Image (cartoon, grey):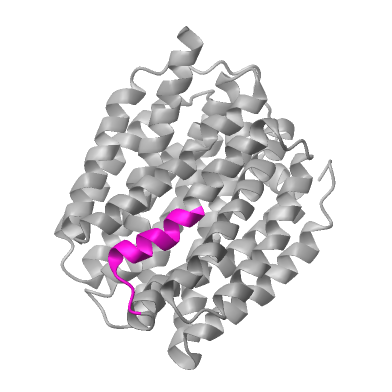
């Protein structure tokens, strides 16, 4: 009973963490458009969050392994996010929003690697770990729904801050993680050992992040979608990811690296489909597909890394790779959209994801 209660508490903290992030992240291009009309500046603002996450995840992920500390970074991360995400309420121009997004990226990056490592170490049955991590996707689903239904950015900032504050309170009920042993491999060694995995992930997510930067704007400006209709589009993504992650725990017995490669390869079909839509609702099946591919990438990649490397260090590099992609992708999106139009961004994504899949084929069980 005690273990079940602990797992439910972990599920709730994961849910609150990602709900708080999602309700602002998805709508940030639209929010940024209210303080600047420049697509390039919007790309910079979207990138700022991820740029701060890169440094935060690498630093605190490594310290988490070296000091065998998980919960402290989880707790301080929740408390810091409650403050920084609430500060979005007071952003009044592009510069203030940029600074606040960087602060939010730093505080969220503090807890992400430690949270993944904590989940993995807390559960003896690794199949159940996938079920717990699936609340990451459920959190994004609910966060997007709240953002869409609220239809008011000021209210979203307050609600997000409250979610993180509740997460901080609940995280104080979590027991200390049982870290079996410390692994002394350096960040550089972990990266070089898994270089093909990280490189294919980097390219895949550069393509994805470039499209996510312009997709909400496309849906609103070109396809006349409302906030709640954008929510429907993104819900299909997160709901599919949540369901696939839970099915994966018991029904999908593929090797973790195979899951990762499948996720990378199938992503190209998502953007081929998005390049052909002419109504907002037509994006739904393709967003559902990308949710499925993300489940394979996230679970396959992270589980492979945690089985063979220092856990927070490896997951910190994984998360930082996503953050680096989320810096580069929006910049490419801003440049291509400004000079060549929105659809060009999607074509760019297709090309880099195909390259990512080719690179992923070099990954084997050892590297």
Q: Position of residue 137 (x, y in %)?
A: 48, 44
The correct choice, above or below, for 119 with respect to 51 in the image is above
Q: Is residue 193 visible?
A: no
Residue pictured at 60% horizontal, 43% vertical: 244
Name the magenta segment's main secondary structure. Answer: helix
Identify the residue at horizontal 63%, vertical 60% (top origin): 202
Q: Nearer the viewer, residue 35 or 264?
A: 264
Is residue 79 or residue 290 the one in the foreground? 290
The image quadrant that residue 293 belongs to is bottom right
Q: Height in image: 262 above or below 31? A: above
Residue at the far top: name it: 1
For the question of whether residue 298 can be seen, the reply is yes
* Residue 40 in picture, x, y percent from top left: 39, 80
Q: From which residue to which does the magenta span run?
A: 224-237
Q: Position of residue 121 (x, y in %)?
A: 59, 22
Placement of 355 over or under 133, stated as above or below: below
Q: Quadrant of residue 166?
A: top left
Q: Is residue 4 left or right of residue 20?
A: right
Q: Is residue 193 left or right of residue 313?
A: right
- Left/right of residue 350 with respect to residue 48 in the rendered view: right
Residue beneath the point at 73% across and 47% down:
259
> Residue lying furthest bottom in this view?
339
Which residue occupies 33% across, 79% down? 224
Q: Is residue 271 magenta?
A: no
Total labels: the figure holds 0
**At which x and y percent is residue 81?**
30, 43
């Amino acid at each position: 009973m005690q273990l079940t209660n602990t797992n439910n508490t972990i599920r709730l903290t994961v849910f609150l963490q990602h709900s708080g992030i999602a309700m602002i992240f998805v709508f940030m291009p639209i929010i940024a458009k209210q303080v600047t009309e420049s697509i390039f500046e919007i790309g910079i603002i979207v990138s700022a969050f991820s740029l701060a996450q890169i440094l935060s995840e690498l630093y605190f992920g490594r310290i988490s392994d070296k000091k065998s500390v998980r919960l402290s970074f989880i707790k301080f991360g929740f408390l810091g996010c409650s403050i920084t995400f609430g500060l979005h309420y007071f952003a009044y121009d592009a510069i203030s929003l940029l600074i606040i997004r960087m602060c939010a990226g730093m505080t969220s990056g503090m807890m992400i690697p430690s949270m993944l490592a904590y989940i993995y170490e807390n559960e003896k049955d690794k199949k159940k770990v996938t079920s717990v991590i699936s609340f990451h996707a459920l959190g994004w689903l609910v966060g997007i729904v709240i953002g869409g239904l609220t239809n008011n950015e000021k209210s979203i900032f307050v609600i997000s801050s409250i979610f993180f504050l509740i997460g901080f309170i609940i995280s104080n009920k979590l027991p200390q993680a049982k870290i079996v042993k410390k692994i002394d491999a350096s960040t550089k060694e972990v990266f070089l050992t898994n270089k093909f995995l990280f490189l294919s992930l980097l390219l895949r997510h550069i393509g994805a992040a470039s499209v996510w930067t312009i997709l909400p704007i496309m849906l609103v400006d070109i396809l006349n979608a409302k906030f709640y209709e954008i929510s429907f589009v993104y819900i299909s993504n997160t709901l599919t990811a949540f369901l696939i992650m839970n099915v994966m725990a018991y029904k999908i017995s593929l090797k973790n690296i195979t899951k990762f490669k499948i996720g990378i390869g199938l992503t190209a079909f998502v953007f081929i489909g998005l390049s052909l839509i002419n109504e907002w609702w037509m994006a739904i099946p393709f967003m559902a597909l990308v949710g499925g591919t993300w489940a394979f990438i996230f679970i396959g990649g992270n589980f492979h890394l945690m089985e063979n490397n220092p856990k927070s260090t490896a997951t910190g590099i994984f998360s930082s790779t996503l953050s680096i992609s989320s810096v580069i992708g929006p910049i490419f999106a801003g440049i291509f959209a400004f000079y060549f139009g929105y659809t060009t961004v999607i074509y760019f994504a297709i090309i880099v994801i195909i390259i990512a899949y080719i690179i992923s084929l070099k990954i084997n069980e050892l590297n």
